[in-house]
Image (cartoon, rainbow, N blue to C red):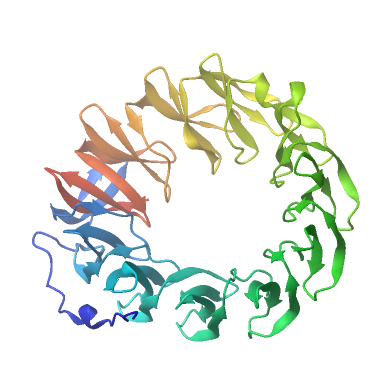
Amino acid sequence: MERTISFALMGLLVLSLVSGCRDSDGLGKTGGTGEFRVLCEATLEFEYVSEFSQGYAAVYQDGKWGYINKAGQMAIPNVFDYAEPFIDGCALVSVAIDSAEHGWTPLYGLLGLDGEPLVPVEYEFIGEFNDGLALVKRESQFGYIDKTGKVAIPCQYDIAEGFSEGRAAAVSENMFGYIDKAGKNVIPFQYESAISFSEGLAMVSSDGKHGFVDTNGGAAIPLEYYYAGSFSDGLAAVSIGNFADIKMGYIDKSGKTAIPFEFETAQDFSGGIALVKKGGDDDLCYIDKAGNVVLRHGDYDFILDFSEGLAPVRNDGKWGFVDISGRLAIPCLYEWVGERGFSDGLALVKNGNKWGFVDNAGKVAIPFEYDALYEFSDGFAAAYKGQGFGVIDRAGNVVVPFEYDFIGYINEGLAFFSENDKWGILELVR
């Protein structure tokens, strides 16, 4: 029989300040042209720390997770087997329980910022909040809770998805339909499959054929396709034929063919382009919404995803960037690029054996003078230079001097640093 975990464990008294930590009102140090405050000296002993979020950081020690505040105090005891950062005032946590029927099984709950439970640790699954409700699973059935932890729709569905555009796909008596946020069945349970609404339409299927319904259940596009995806940028990838001879193309919201059925595979549009596989010389390529090929994978050794209208490409061992027209916007000059590509107008690149940032015109924004450099977070980036780690801002100013064993997990103007295998906390001042 399934056991429910109470939050009695969370009633444990929290220890007073961790030894060596302080919360100072004045600036502790000046580094270069920036300033920072040491909120907690390097006295914290944790095996793992996460970035700060809403004033708390999840920390791991001796097999358990808890949360500290920015002064380094253990604000929420480490009694959890799993813990995520706080988002919108709540954090997902888990405790594993041992039952005769299932063995060790994780159960999930939600904490509030005060450390008190918003949702008891008794669910087999808790999803993200969408449209103000989160999908939950209990005793193998799905339902929904609101942000106060109150059950909005009881756990009564065999399968369900999160809400989107005021509707959620769910299964009753082995058939898919849609419910509203009050739990009312607004689109009958009559489909073999169904997915979430996107841009006012949702894919449904019956007798092996796929089409689209609107939020009132009206047949917006007939069920006549072998496969259909979601609408994105006003178009949806669909297929005709069968498994042995499938051809994919794109339709608009009226059901009209927007891009002919000539692809082996086709992904959703994003930012005006989509990745497709056509075969032959056009094997894998990006197309625009008119169906024109703007970039072929075969033209480069490697292509990463687009971000902010530019995609990293590698040619002859060097990296550069192309725009959505396929034009080489930044020449292939660099040994490596950061995983994000462009973010807020800057991209991390490696020139020779040093790291820096370039802007979207290819101009050097942060000089190539760092032995290691991380992506910007909250306007700051950790870097390694010479014999230690420090922090720079987006203008390239040194905020924290290069004298620490490690600095990372920057968020909300807070950063963890380490010295002699112990953690401390910095507050970064713009």
Nearer to the camera, 195 or 423: 195
Work out whether residue 209 can be spotted. yes
Asked whether, in this view, residue 66 is left or right of residue 364, the answer is left
Q: In screen coordinates, is 265 left or right of 81?
A: right
Name the residue at 51% across, 80% down.
145
258 vs 349, nearest the viewer: 258
Residue 32 seen from this side = no
The residue at the point 30 percent across, 45 percent down is 408
Name the image quarter holding residue 15. bottom left
Quarter occupied by residue 61: bottom left
Question: Residue 158 appears at what percent x and percent y?
Answer: 57, 74
Q: Is residue 150 above or below residue 278?
A: below
Left or right of 206 in this view: 7: left
- The front one of 175 and 70 is 175
Residue located 49% across and 74% down the image:
136
The percent coordinates of residue 90 (x first, y second) are 40, 72
